[in-house]
Image (tube, rainbow, N blue to C red):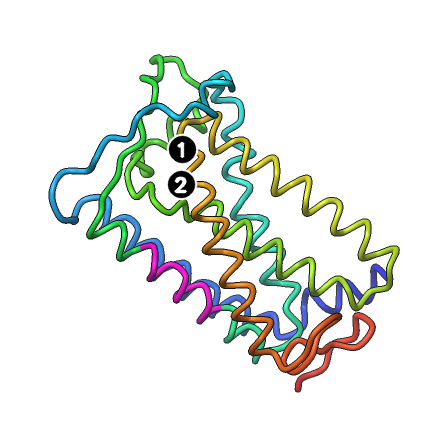
Amino acid sequence: MMRALGLRMTNDFFAKLFTGAAVLGICGVMYAGLQRWHLGAPFVQAECPVSALLAFDVRWTPVYLSMFALVGVAWLALPNRRAVRRFAVTILAMESVAWVFFFAMPMECPRPVAPADVFWIYRVMIGFDAPVNCFPCLHSALVALAGGAIWREVGAGGWRVAAAARGVVVAWGAAILVSILILRQHTAVDVGAGIALGAAACVFIWRGSGGRGRGGGCWRAGRWGCRRV
């Protein structure tokens, strides 16, 4: 099983690498730009009642940032170039929806002032990720999309593999969602809207892949085999 998993991850590796780099570059430029360029001053949201139940703790920063690793796992799990292209287009379409909100309805989430000796990873994060671009939460949207992609792909590996992998993904994704609220990066409404956006993106991919269940069309990869369709 591990050998088959390795083959899946390395199949069309350079196509995944270059396409992923292009998508990351586009999304990064747009996200950073919209932190500065938007219509009017951002609306400062009220403190989230759900977040108020969770103590602010910068030690959750690595969990928050692990979203990028989750998306990377989903990206490498794609079976072929066609699936990579469709996943890339879906991410860009999903983020474009969010970009419209960021530009037309800028919202800011109140974030506690960090002490001077704060955890260095947190200090780096807030240096490039201002508490704007809040609604919808792209962090939770990407968690939903990546988690959905992995959930579907591991279905080709047998029920034991699928159950174990899906359990890990659910726990990992849930931890990331909790970290968003603990770090006061978004409110619960933002997170919920992001999950809905990511779920809609999953439906778009699945319906366009030509099949249901354990995969069809561009998602079909046999029993963890790697072939182009």
Which residue type carries mark 2?
A: Asp
**Quarter of image, res 188:** top left
Q: Assess disc 2: are there few (<14), some (14-19) or many (≥20) residues with their C-alpha within 10 Å of its C-alpha.
A: many
Which residue type carries mark 1?
A: Thr
The residue depicted at 65 percent of the width and 83 percent of the height is 217
Looking at the magenta stretch, what is its main secondary structure?
helix
The residue depicted at 41 percent of the width and 61 percent of the height is 94
The residue depicted at 54 percent of the width and 49 percent of the height is 143
Report helix, strand or loop for mark 1.
loop
Where is the N terminus found, in terms of image quarters?
A: bottom right
219 above or below 152? Answer: below
Q: In the rendering, which numbered label is found on residue 187? A: 1
Residue furthest left in the image: 40
Which residue is label 2 attached to?
A: 190
Where is the C terminus found, in terms of image quarters?
A: bottom right
Q: Write down the region rendered in magenta.
A: 88-98
- Taking the magenta stretch, the answer to whether it contains residue 91 is yes
Q: Is residue 25 left or right of residue 30?
A: right
Of 125 and 208, nearer the camera is: 208
Q: Position of residue 157 (x, y in %)?
A: 82, 65
Q: Is residue 184 left or right of residue 178?
A: left
Q: How many marks?
A: 2
Asked whether disc 2 touches disc 1, contact meaning CB atoms under 8 Å apart, the reply is yes
Q: Position of residue 183 (x, y in %)?
A: 44, 27
The residue depicted at 61 percent of the width and 43 percent of the height is 173
Report helix, strand or loop for mark 2.
helix
Q: Position of residue 93 (x, y in %)?
A: 39, 66
- Taking the magenta stretch, the answer to whether it contains residue 70 is no
55 above or below 167? Answer: above
103 above or below 94? Answer: above
